[in-house]
């Protein structure tokens, strides 16, 4: 008997796929420290991303998680399914060796984004454990960081 394995590929049905990960506390945007993050909500960000993805004919899977292990698993399972990852690791940016190792363990290029300019804030935010393994980082442009990040991620599909 011949069993056909159906694999979800990064270009399922000819459509390019990007995994978008919002890290901890980003679900609270809109009410969280508006002096830093403004009034933009995660839904606003996602709507902007979906609009752009539609125009660029790219499929998105968008996930928010407050749990490091969950983010590690998402990244670990991304190989072959997604052409690129767009990630705001939020507070884990500055602490997570596990997320960094997950990114460097898969052959899926990642773009790191932040709403705020982490280099203009407290010193502990100046170090990103993620940026050395990301293809690049965009920060400081609010919601626009994600739009620019998605543009970069789409450009990376098929290039790692
Ligand atoms: C953030 C910056 C991080 O330092 C912080 O912990 C966040 C949000 C940003 O998008 O500006 O939660 O990633």
Image: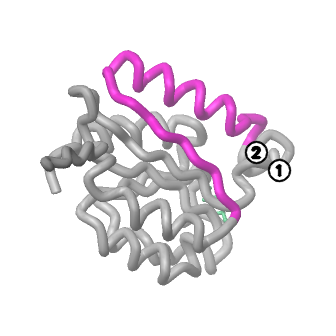
Q: Nearer the viewer, residue 48 or 148?
A: 48
Depth check: give the residue in front, 110 or 141: 110
Q: Tag on residue 29? A: 2
Around disc 1, counting alpha carbons within 10 Å, would you say few (fewer than 14), some (14 to 19), or many (20 or more)?
some
State which quadrant residue 160 falls in.
bottom left
Q: Is residue 114 magenta?
A: no
Say how many tags the image has.
Answer: 2
Q: Is residue 56 magenta?
A: yes
| Residue 94 in the image, given as x and y percentages of width and height | 57, 76
Mark 2 secondary-structure assignment: loop
Choose between 53 and 137: the one closer to the eye.
Answer: 53
Quadrant of the image where one finds ligand 1: bottom right
Left or right of 48 in this view: 58: left
Colour setting: one colour
Q: Is residue 44 above or below residue 157?
A: above
Residue in the image at 83% along x and 50% along y: 32
Q: CA distance from mark 1 to mark 2?
A: 5 Å
Describe the element under mark 1 as helix, strand or loop: loop
The residue at the point 70 percent across, 51 percent down is 26
Q: Which residue is mark 1?
A: 32
Q: Is residue 52 above or below residue 67?
A: above
The vertical placement of 126 against 155, above or below, is below
For the view shown, which residue lies furthest in the right direction?
Answer: 31
Which portion, as a residue range, is magenta? 38-66
Q: Is residue 90 left or right of residue 31?
A: left
- From what the image shows, is residue 13 above or below residue 24? above
Looking at the image, residue 16 sits to the left or right of residue 26; the answer is: left
Rendering coords of residue 114 (x, y %): 55, 53
Residue 115 as seen in the image, left or right of residue 109: right
Residue 12 coordinates in the image, percent (x, y): 27, 34
């Amino acid at each position: 008997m011949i069993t056909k394995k159906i694999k979800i590929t990064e270009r399922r049905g000819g459509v390019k796929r990007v995994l978008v990960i919002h890290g901890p506390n980003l679900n609270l945007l809109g009410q969280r420290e508006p002096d830093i993050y403004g009034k933009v909500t995660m839904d606003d960000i996602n709507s902007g991303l979906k609009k752009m993805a539609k125009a660029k004919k790219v499929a998105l899977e968008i996930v928010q998680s407050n749990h490091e292990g969950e983010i590690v698993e998402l990244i670990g399972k991304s190989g072959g399914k997604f052409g690129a990852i767009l990630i705001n690791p939020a507070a884990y940016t500055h602490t997570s060796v596990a997320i960094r190792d997950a990114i460097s363990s898969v052959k899926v290029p990642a773009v790191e984004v932040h709403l705020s300019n982490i280099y203009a804030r407290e010193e502990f935010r100046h170090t990103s454990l993620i940026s050395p393994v990301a293809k690049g980082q965009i920060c400081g442009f609010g919601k626009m960081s994600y739009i620019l990040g998605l543009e970069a991620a789409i450009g990376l599909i098929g290039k790692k």
